[in-house]
Image: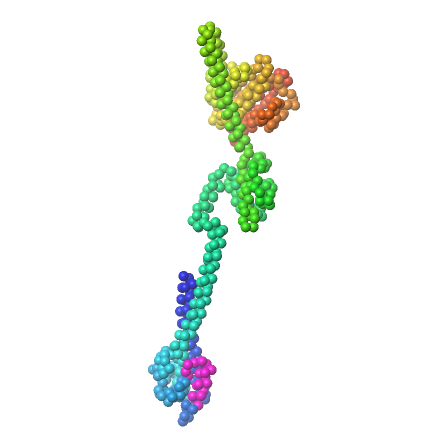
Amino acid sequence: MLILLLTTFFSYMESKEIEENKGRMALEISKTVSFIPNIIAAFQTSDPSKTIQPLAEKIRKETGAEFVVIGNKEGTRYSHPQTALIGKKMKGGDNQRALKNGEYYVSKAKGSLGPSIRGKSPIMNKEGEVIGIVSVGFLLEDVHQQIMNNVTKVLLVSLFALLISLLGSILLGRNIRKDTMGLEPYEIAALYKEKNAVLHGVKEGILAIDKHGFITMMNQPAKRLLHINGTVRNLKVDGLFPSDYLYEVLKSGNPQADKEMVWKDKTVIVNCTPLFDENGVSRVVASFRDKTEIEQMVNTISEVKRYSEDLRAQTHEFTNKLYVLSGLLQLEEYEQAIDMIQTETQVLQFQNSIVFNHIKDTKVQAILLGKLGKASEKKVKFEVVSDSQLEALPSHFKLSNLIVILGNLIDNAFEAVYGFDSPTVKFFVTDIGSDIIFEIADNGKGLTEKEIPLLFGRGYTSKKGDEPRGFGLSNAEEAVLEMNGMIEVQSTPESGTVFTVYLPKEYERR
């Protein structure tokens, strides 16, 4: 459409310009002829046509004009391309301005040769009197033919340009659709919005680099995870954090999965995926996960599972006792059944009176009740010290953390006394002062001075077997530190071990 409009406009302007040029040329030729001395002098002779006709014809042929007609003041021709018309009156009716007023002008009129565009100039003698006229013209038919020839050329060029532009548009469209994978603009815009929403909505950190190692995209979780502030677009990835995995994927084109990277105070799990184009690997996208959070989640699930197993053990123990009681009643051993009920009732009353009367926090109550059942099943005496005192815990004391801390320490104590005579584990808690203090003591074999510093190391264990061990105390310490607390160990060989945990009531986020 634009090419068509431009072509029409150019054709119109071209036609106007050609007409103006022809008129201007005719006028200039007529002016020049009107000042030729021989022509002026010929007007004084008896036969002006004899001198003027050859000159006029020569000028006509050299200038390409259709006619050069010279006439006297009365309009009688002294020259004409058709010699038979010499001596006759000039036609067109457009001589008056030149003959009467001495004007130089361009006009359009129909003469003896047909419609034409003419340049009119008066011929003056030395006194300045008008003695004749010069009329130089070009046929409008020839002018229109020239216009058509020029417009045809313009149209051909425009048509060629149109074909080239159409071909270019088709090729460009194909190339663009190839780059955009056949998506329409509105689909690309929708995908862009969705991409931004996903990038900033996921919890994982996501980062992308080009083949030169410059960052092209990084979402906010990645910045938080890697402790990066401000914009990083078009910065080299090298100086921001260890980038060996990224460059390895760029070089090999092979994805890297679940690689661990230590960065500052965090252990980060990295996944790197290459993006390809026709030249090979063009970009690498990496995702980051905080391994610490994953480990905490796994540990919490593990401890909750252990807690549920403790409740199952308690249920199992009471089920066994109910079976025994049922057997005694069936055998009509009523006295033994009554003694068993009274004994169990006394034990439960004593334990529950301490748990429910001295310890008011339901989370700790639940943990202790589960451990009481487990101790009964393992034939371990688990005693809640009667001096214990605990009100409801502050809101930042989460059940998951308490399960990890108390569950691991109590279970560790149960295992420490397993196989000993009179295995006993004591639990004490107090909330007097600014800290909540938990104390778990056992009468096991105790620890040496060399073993105590290794206790909280991940994977350290003094027990034998194929089952993975050595994570319970490490998890407990991490949970204590997360709550801004501390844990102490006191132990001597053959005298048992005491774990003391201090958790501040007021929690300050580090």
Residue stretch in magenta:
51-68
Residue 104 seen in this snapshot: no
Q: Is residue 63 magenta?
A: yes
Using residue 454 as the reference point, say whether residue 84 is left or right of it: left
433 and 270: which is toward the camera: 270
Residue 113 seen in this snapshot: yes
Q: Position of residue 161 (x, y in %)?
A: 46, 64
Q: Position of residue 249 (x, y in %)?
A: 58, 43
Q: How is the image coloured?
A: rainbow
Quarter in which the C terminus is drawn: top right
506 and 295: which is toward the camera: 295
From what the image shows, is residue 324 above or below residue 20? above
Residue sitting at 60 percent across and 41 percent down? 244
From what the image shows, is residue 87 above or below residue 106? below
Using residue 116 as the reference point, say whether residue 369 is left or right of it: right
Quarter in which the N terminus is drawn: bottom left
Residue sitting at 43 percent across and 84 percent down? 34
Q: Is residue 168 magenta?
A: no
Residue ranking furthest to the right: 450
